[in-house]
Image (cartoon, rainbow, N blue to C red):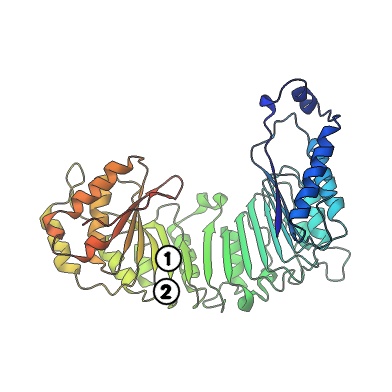
Amino acid sequence: QRIIFDFIPDVDDLPEPARSNLVDNSLISEAVPQNLRAVAERTLAIAPNARNIAFHRTMPFRASLTFSSMDFYMTKCLGVLLPQQVDGLYSLGMPVVSSVLEALAPRALRTMIVRHTASKEHELELAIRNHKTLERLHTSGSRDLQISDLIVDSSSADGTRVFPQLRHLVIEHNSEMRPQSKQPRINPFPRLETLTCRGVFPFSSPLIFADGHLRLRHIDIELDLELLESWHHAHVLDKHAFAGLSFLNLGWTRSSHRHYSLACAQQLTRTAVELSASTCVLHLFNRMGVDLSTTLQEIEFPQFLQHLETKDIMLDVDQLVGLLSRLPRLRSAVVGFQCSLECSEHGEVPEQEIKATQERLRGTSTASVRELTVNAHGYRHFGKAAENAVLLADMLPSVRRMGIYSTSRSLTSELSIIDSIRKRPVYMDNEQLGLVKFSIICSWTNEPLQRGWPFK
């Protein structure tokens, strides 16, 4: 279904004079175009029904390699590898050069995913040419690409270029200012189901959500204070405004941080939680570290919520047990966890502190969460984070997997710390705790360093 070309420029490893020819952009060898065509023909014979073509750049090109070099390579490939049924372009780190634009001109693209390219002129033109057929559009690094130009058409009666089939729109790393003069007069995306925007949100008009209250299933955007206020005024973000929403992630743009306050954080948190009664996945952010613990206790969460992420909102063990017990269908969560217990210099919690918590909270949890990850960032000693994580698992009998964020790469020692804590006499009477699989999550990559195992 898809043909992928992976360009791996390694100029320094080429022998002379090939290296000089490449650097000087003097591609005069007859063997290069012949080989490219042979590879393209053989690939097409193997995959005659391919509907998508992908160009991937493994490493950054040297500054001396111009777009005309890439134009040469891609022209030779595209001249063969574009049967009429191709309707998808995936370009990861590769420029949409003129050869791509011309080769794809007679076709009706349904998918266009272009990420991390340095040239945007042809990308914009290609999207506009295919605006009637595109179903999925993904653009990344849009500093030079005027997103607003995609939807504003001064030649049309309503001044709007409508994408009638577009269902998935992703705009990443957008940094352009939101032009007030270039906004649609009608909804440009009447069938949109998925909307993701990282960086400055390029649309100020609430018309972008005109039909979204029923169709939108996935919203992942960053807001600023001006946009949040205008949307509230237009009732775009009213309580339960989006009937079919299943995934929601509302955050702040970087430019909003200097105006950030507790009131702003509370408003955004309450808006995100109450926007839809059907939300299954909910991410809440608190990058400025204001105290939102009370706000979370007061908000009515969606009854169908299955995954919750609040790793920037610090809660103690009592607050977490209470919060998770209010979410009967929750299956997984990533939470911020602050220690409210007295600890030794090396992070060890005295047994009397643990016993007091057990007497207060054991048997009170009605949580259904199975997989829980706790943010241990900010703890001076990993032992303190591990003590609190094991204590939390002891209070939540439904938990079967427990991940702990850590900046350390000493996986073996950290797992051994958890093992020794688990074997403390104060936990020996809890057989369920012995079934919990612990793992260490790298704070830098957000990936498990290793899947844990049951400590028995």
| Callout 2: SS | loop
Q: Which residue is mark 2?
A: 301
Q: Is residue 19 visible?
A: yes
| Callout 1: SS | strand
Measured along the vertical axis of the image, is residue 185 above or below residue 225? below
User: x%, y% of residue 342?
Assistant: 17, 51
User: x%, y% of residue 158?
Assistant: 83, 71
Query: Amino acid type of disc 2?
Result: Phe
Measured along the vertical axis of the image, is residue 120 above or below residue 400? above
Q: Which residue is mark 1?
A: 308
Q: Counting other residues with Cα less than 10 Å from the Cα at mark 2, is it few (<14), some (14-19), or many (20 or more)?
A: many
Q: Check residue 322 in the rendering and tell me which mark sits there, or answer none.
A: none
Depth check, mark 2 against mark 1: the one in front is 1
Front one among 224 and 6: 6
Query: Amino acid type of disc 1?
Result: Leu
Q: Do residues under tags 2 and 1 come within 8 Å of each other at their CB atoms?
A: yes
Residue at 72%, 68% (x, y): give it: 166
User: x%, y% of residue 29?
Assistant: 84, 29
